[in-house]
Image (cartoon, rainbow, N blue to C red):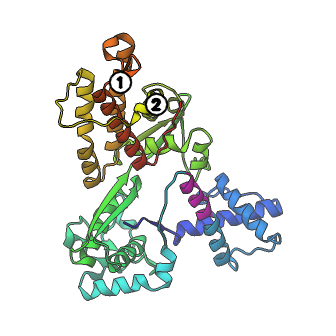
Amino acid sequence: MIREYYINDHGNQIYNFTKSVYYRIKEITSKTTFPDEKDLYPGEYIKEIANKIIDLNKDNKNLDFKKDFKHLKNLSLKFSMNLIKDDLKKLKIVHDKFVSETELIENKRVEETINYLKEKNYIEENILPAPKGINKKDWIQKKKLIFKSTSFGDDLDRALTKDDGSWTYFASDTAYHYDKINRGFELLINILGADHAGYVKRITSAVEALSKNKTFINCKVCRLVKLFKNGKPFKMSKRSGEFINVSDLLNEVSSDNIRFIMLSKSNDVEIEFDFNKIIEKNKDNHVYYIQYANARINSLFETLGGQSDIKLDINKELNLNIYEKKIFRKVLEWPHIIQSAVNKLEPHKIPFYLYDLANLFHSYWSAGAKNSQYKFIKKNNIEDITFSIIKLVHIVIQNGMKILGVNLPKKM
């Protein structure tokens, strides 16, 4: 398995991004006012990138946007990606490869892909109908290169070139997928943002055409994350300058909490990230409750000392109490949970399962405080079967949280 990060570093948004950095540099070095233009990015992280570029070259007063655009763009992207990579590292997210859209275009990969599709008669030069919501009178009819995605079940054919003849994002993305197909990948998993939900069918059609149905693509569209603190929402917008990045989150909560919350929801469900709830120490905080179960088991092992190497004799009849039966049944579900999470690409099943298992263990622990019949340790000893059940819980929680990349403190 290879994890790749596709960098959209070409087009109008990158032009506006670079322009924003340029104006921040001029603001810092020449005390000019940052323009109030809707396409610019006024966020604080732009200032951070601008300052890094200034540190490289103190003489930025004579910086010319048009003349120095390429150099400024490269530096802006470099420092922007450094920020992103640093945040990913803090969250223990590792990518094996970073792929640049600009490099695909400059290395003629897009042209290569378009030529291949032309050979297969999947591309034509034609005029697309006006998009929905646009007055036909305002629509400029112009011939463009068009991918016949309706031949593969899409509702519309898709433009590969813009009015000015440059490549569309879809053309570059198609080239990227052709590159992966040529590298021999048979299964592609795309993680897309909520605003790309309408993109799924066209890219699926492109992969089908490019691979002759030999490569399968699964697109997972992720919903937005809503941040709450003190009952009030944190709004996120790169354009308004109220962008909340991972570093901001890490100033409030640990990376373990962030990873667990992000993994505990299906990709098609909107995530509500409540800062107040995630620092609470009760069963409503699922990651805490699982970690607390592990800490309790560790304390039990310490108390037992030399008895921690007890092994269950599977040839004997299992005489389980009501709590042990529930836990044992839940433990037996573990292989099926893993299999389902992998086959269906649904990692959220793992944290839900671990929480249920931890809940059963805590119930058993609490029962012992109320009824001596359910105490784990009696007369400085523990039943082999009881210890084995608890050991199973410990093993599953350890393995499960390792899969999620969430730490398990020994003591809490």
**Does the magenta-highlighted stretch encompass residue 304?**
no
Q: Position of residue 344 (x, y in %)?
A: 26, 52
| Looking at the image, residue 353 lies above or below residue 55 | above
| Looking at the image, residue 110 lies above or below residue 187 | below
Residue 201 shows in this picture: yes
| Left or right: where 117 falls relative to 84 | left
Q: Distance between the residues labelled 1 and 2?
A: 11 Å
**Residue annotated with mark 1:** 382
| Looking at the image, residue 155 lies above or below residue 340 | below
Residue 245 shows in this picture: no
What is the magenta range? Answer: 80-90
| Left or right: where 122 falls relative to 284 | left
Q: Front-most of 374 and 186?
A: 374
Secondary structure, magenta segment, majority class: helix
Residue shown at 23% from the left, 27% from the top: 325
Q: Where is residue 223 in the image (x, y as percent from the top left)?
A: 39, 48
**Residue annotated with mark 2:** 305
